[in-house]
Amino acid sequence: MFVGLTLGVAVVFSVDIANQSAKRAFALSLDSITGRTTHQIVGGVSGIDEGIYTQLRTRLGVRQSAPVVEGTLTVQGPDGSESLQLLGIDIFSEPMFRSQLSSLQDVGEPGDATRESLALLEFGAVFTGNSTAARLGLSIGDTVKVKAGGATRAVKLANVIDTTHQAAFDSMVMTDIATAQWLLDMSGRLSRIDLITDNPAQLEEIKNTFSEVSIADASRRNNALVQMTGAFHTNLLAMSLLALLVGAFLIYNTVTLSVLQRRMLFGQLRVAGVDRQALASAIVIEVLAFTLLGLVAGLLAGYALGGVLLNLVTRTINDLYFTLEVRQLNVSVFNVLKITVMAVLAALVAVAVPAMEAANSPPVTLTQRSALESKTGRLLPWLATGGCALGVLGFLMLWLSASLLMAFCALFMIVIGYSLLIPGSLYWAARLTGKMSFSGAGVTGNYPMRSLSASLSRVAVAVTALAVAVSATAGVGIMIGSFRASVADWLDQTLQADFYVRDSESLDNALPQEFVDAVDSLAIVTGKRLSRMFDVDAGGTPARLLALELTGDMNRGLSLIGHHTSVDEQWTQWSAPDSLFISEPLAWQLALNAGEKLSITTENGVRDFHIAGVFTDYGAGRGLIIMPMATMHLHWQDRGLSSIGVSLNAGSVDDADRFRRLVKPWPQLLVRSDGDIRELSMRIFDQTFAITHILRLLTAGVAFVGILSALLALTLERRHEFAVLRALGLTPNEMRRVLLSQTAWMGLIAGLLALPLGILMSGILVAVINRRSFGWTMQYSVSTGVLWESVALAFIAALLAAIYPAWRIGRMLPTQALRQR
Amino acid sequence: MNQTSLAPYLNIHGLEKSYPAGSGYQTVLRGVSLQVYRGERLALLGQSGSGKSTLLNLIAGIDTPDSGGITVDGVSIGLLTEKDRTLFRRRHIGFIYQSFNLIQTLTALENVQLPLQLNGADRRQAAEQSARMLDRVGLGARGDAFADQLSGGEQQRVAIARAMVHRPALVLADEHTGNLDAETGASMMGLFNEIAEETSQTVVMVTHSSAVAATANRVALITDGRIAESDLNVSDALAW
């Protein structure tokens, strides 16, 4: 009972705190970047002119404003290079926006913080978090080389920030605005200007004065960032809820078994004169005491496991979204309370029925196994009816509501509904197999199956837990398989060039014009894909704009969805002025379709664009907008290129070498073949789902323990029965075979029953949950391999769980068990 | 029956058995020797704790002696491996317990079928033979009932049917009427002896009951782990 409870609690708690810690670190990170900012003045691809800041303060008198230059830099540490976020600030206007400068390590007296922060004014001086400095082996005063904006420069670590309460600084470098402009090659430019204002008239005045910039609501920008990772966390939450469901099953199973196997004792106590209330209270108190013990052990084990999971979660966020360093688990009272309520509730529900039954049944029936099993048998039609009703309700919810939360509720109702059908299916399957087993009867005839169907009260919950766990494995496996196939197809379609070249730091950085000219003059290039990429504000949401120009034999490489007009017609519309394509996730987020208008803040002010089509995009970041390069040039001054894709003559090896040699003189440029990008993308994809694999294994582990505890309880309870069989002439090996055949059958049935639920679950995940989370439409494909794997998992888990009980049965002394009777 | 002219079917000599008890050992059997002849019905009388049930378990090969030997129909049980002992028991021995020891998860009919199935009987044949045996013990109509749905007398009849359905040469009965009232016990003994006589089974029965002992050919008396008397006739035994 203790082990079952501990494991159930540990799995749920670890997933919960890992998820929570990553979210908290993300929130801290956002808070540190935006602080008390209410609005942000943002510009186009190259940021905004710093003269705007001067005018803002002098001409318009907006005092509560702070300039910011931000970007990414790379530092070489003892464990390899590390990407850090660079935040360039003006220390005189900062205190009203962000409070991090108060966390300087050498601070002694009040007022020292401001004094220490003056060290940033020294050109080339930077601050970073104390843990980052320790990780990189740096001390205050050290000079370190950093790579940013295509160049390597030396900076001095002037001070460190205590990150105990400011976790976001774990991965951040702070410097004065002038140093940041120097490092990022942004001389005279700012990334944004932060504002604190609640005056609409003032905002209007700023808008009218500076038409080339736009004003974004800081909370909306933050929300967009939260939404980016929100979907990932939602999927993690789904897995943790599934673990919770299986964990609750395990706790239920453990508690039920511990009570059921002592029915005889309860009957004897009742005969001896213990009254109903006293008996029920004693059972409940005992179970609660064990639950609390298991809870404490489970919380400790869960904390240890949470550290492992947290690494996987942050790795996924780093791969998919942005640099996020979380080195500390964040456990709140709420986390502990949530798990405590779950465990106690599961234990109370589990103990309620057998305790009430033990207290209310006549003592004589407590000593009869058949009475309990008859009761269980009578419950089956009710369970099945309830299960069907829950399932229908779940499907109705999916159909009627478009909300993600409702989709999750519906999914769980369907899972619980289906699990209520499992005990009945198990009973009938055992009866059917029992009848069939006569014809091919081994020495024990139909005993194994009959004894199973007569022990439904003991094995049904364990088999249900195993089936649900395996269905989750199958469901998520099919979903990942479908997703992987969709991404692979999408990459094949998107990657039309043989090579892609971009700046190694950021797509915001333009390629050197000399390189662009060199590519133009290269005869082996048969087609080009020229692109410029930067952030824009689209319909009030941050999005990524990709301006595209295709030349020569370069294919379009986009998969357009929706069939209101032909693909050619959509491309024709796209080429017209002020037209664009938007990605499916953006269309989903803004509830827009082809044929409608999208407002984008350009350097000429806000403009409406015609949506010529919607394309498939499995990129994880912000929504993507693709417009012709010529259209972009009409609304933005920027003439740089973010990347060039080239097609070469029949892709010959010599030509590929020639092209690589062409890029060599520009070390800041990154050249990748389509194959490299495909491989890297698929590797990131697989890394992203590594945590899901771990969670699937954990869930299966929980179910394994469920089966093991059920078997151990059964063998303990059935010692006498097994002793009789031994006395009748069953050899130890035959006894072991009886138990193994029972368990193998349970595993097989659990595996088979898991398949319909797994397929159903994957369908809902693919068609509803992922669609509502990310806006992705995926192709749905059920791999028979995943189905076989799932059945094999259930079968093997059950067989492994049977090894120890079978070994114990074989060694049992029949006389001892018979004498105890 | 002229016992001296025949080799004993069951030959027990110098049997010793102790069990761990607390920090030491409790000796249950102290050099028990006994011979039982084919077709004979031997009643083993003795007080509680005198070692009667232990002796039956050793004869059945469910337990092993510390020293001494048991030969059944010329086969030395002690020389057999665990597996062979089990197979020997399966084929040649039927066992009836005071507490019936029916398998709770099987019906009466399925309980009776078990020994036949264990001995490889054909499915239909096993079912027919078991049904006939249940009929014989007066439970033809209760074959589908589970063990705990039967009364004590009914359970004991199923236990007798199960012990005898495969016609074992040796039947061991441990207080098999101990849980029944006098009238049911007497009727049970009548049935038991009738079936045993029909198939010339050798019977060793442990009992406290003089009425049960009275149905035996011979009575042995076991006291404090030793055979005090091995050849009492019924009236002598009753005098004890």
Image (cartoon, coloured by chain):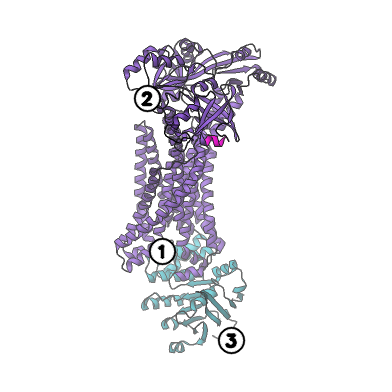
Chain colours: A purple, B cyan
Could you say whether the residue bearing mark 3 is in a helix, strand or loop? Answer: loop
Could you say whether the residue bearing mark 1 is in a helix, strand or loop? Answer: loop
Residue A780, above or below B68: above
Q: Nearer the viewer, residue A665 or A528?
A: A665
Which circle, 2 or 3, is nearer the viewer? 2
Q: Nearer the viewer, residue A526 or A326?
A: A326
- Identity of the residue drawn at 52% across and 83% down: B226
Mark pair 1, 3: CA separation: 44 Å
* Same chain for the residues under marks 2 and 3 in the image: no
Using the image, name the chain to which the residue with label 3 belongs: B
Determine whether label 1 and label 3 are within 8 Å by CB: no
Image location of residue B61, percent across then percent down: 55, 72
Q: Residues in magenta? A: A131-136
Using the image, name the chain to which the residue with label 1 belongs: B
Determine whether label 2 and label 1 are within 8 Å by CB: no
Q: Amino acid at mark 3?
A: Thr
Q: Quadrant of the N terminus of chain A?
A: bottom left
* Residue ID for mark 2: A38
Mark pair 2, 1: CA separation: 83 Å
Mark pair 2, 3: CA separation: 114 Å
- Identity of the residue drawn at 34% across and 42% down: A389
Is the residue marked by circle 2 packed among few (<14), some (14-19), or many (20+) residues within 10 Å?
some
Residue A412, above or below A767: below
* Residue ID for mark 3: B4
- Most common secondary structure along the magenta stretch: helix
* Residue ID for mark 1: B143
Image location of residue A579, percent across then percent down: 45, 13
Q: Amino acid at mark 1?
A: Gly
In the picture, the disc for residue A757 is: none
Could you say whether the residue bearing mark 2 is in a helix, strand or loop? Answer: loop
Is the residue marked by circle 1 packed among few (<14), some (14-19), or many (20+) residues within 10 Å?
some
